[in-house]
Amino acid sequence: MAAAESHPTPETSVIAIDGPAASGKSTVARALASRLGYRFLNSGDLYRAMTWHCLHHGVDCQDSGAVASAAGQARVEIGCDGADYYPLIDGGDPRAHLRSEAINSCVSPVSAVPAVRYILSAAIRAHAQGRRTVVEGRDIGSAVFPETPYKFYIDAPPQVRQRRRRNQGQVEEIARRDLIDSTRSTDPLTVAPGATVIDSSTLDIQGVVAAMLDKLAGQGLGCAIAACSSNG
Ligand code: CDP
C-alpha cells in the first residue's frame, strides 16, 4: 500500500456503518468508536429528531411538501455528550422522544423526502468531516461520505432482526421501514461500493467489532488499531 494511503486524511477519518433496522449496527458502531477513541454519530437520531419536529408542529408526515417546508424552517445542530454526538432542533434536545411508536411509524416517510435528506446529509457532513467519527445510518458509505475507504454494511436475516426488536420490548414491524428505506428514490439503503458486509447473526458484538478492526488494520488504519487491539 502506498504511504499516502496508510494514514487517514481529514476526509477519510470517517468510518461509515450502514445497514437495515435492528441489524445491530448502533451497538457495534459505538463499541468500535470506543475501541478506536473515535466519536460516534447515529445519523438515524437526526432523522428521528426531524420526524419529532414535524409531529410536534402538527405536520402530516405523508405530505412531503409540508415535511419539506417544516424541515427547511428547523435549526439543526449537533451536540456532544461524552463520545456521542446527538441532534438538537431549534436549540432543544429531543432525545427522550426519539424511540416512540409515532416516530417509528413516521420516520421512514419523513426520511424519504429529498429536502430532509439534503439538510441532514449536509449537517452530518459539515460536522463529522475532518473529525475522527464513526457514523452509522443507511446511506453513510453510499451518499454522505462516499470518499471514505472505511465502509461496513451490517446485516442479519429479517426474522433475526425482528426477534431482536421484540426482545428489546418493541412491537414495531421493521419490514415496513426497511421497504421504504430501500426503495425510496433519494439515497436508498444499499450496500455501498467497497463496503465490507458482515452478517451479525453469526457473531456476537465483540466478534463483529473484531472483524471490523481486522479489516481496518488491513486497510492501514494500523497504529491506533494495533494499540487498541493489544489493550483488549
Ligand atoms: O435503530 P434503527 O436501525 O431501527 O433505525 P435508526 O438508525 O434510528 O433510523 C431510523 C430511520 O431513519 C430509518 O429507518 C431511516 O428511515 C432513517 N435514516 C435514513 O434515512 N438515513 C440515515 N442515514 C439514517 C436513518
Image (spheres, rainbow, N blue to C red):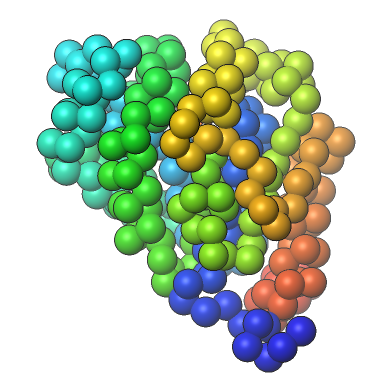
Q: Quadrant of the C terminus?
A: bottom right
Residue 158: quadrant of the picture = top right
Q: Residue at x 81, y 32 (%)?
A: 201
Report whether 72 appears left or right of 182. left
Residue 127 drawn above or below residue 73 = below
The residue drawn where x is 41% and y is 66% is 129
Image spot of residue 23 (x, y percent): 67, 32
Identify which residue, 53 or 34, lies in the foreground.
53
Quick one: 162 or 124, which is closer to the camera?
124
Which residue is drawn at the image coordinates 47% and 44% (left, top)? 42
Drawn side of residue 12 relative to residue 221, left or right:
left
**Where is residue 228 drawn, in percent x and y?**
70, 70
Quarter placement of the N terminus: bottom right
Q: Nearer the viewer, residue 179 or 57?
A: 179
- Residue occupying the point 17% across, 28% down: 70
Residue farthest along the front direction in this orientation: 185
Q: Is residue 16 above or below residue 74?
A: below
Residue 179 in view of the camera: yes
Q: In this rendering, is residue 102 above or below 25?
A: above
Front residue of this view, candidates 58 and 165: 58
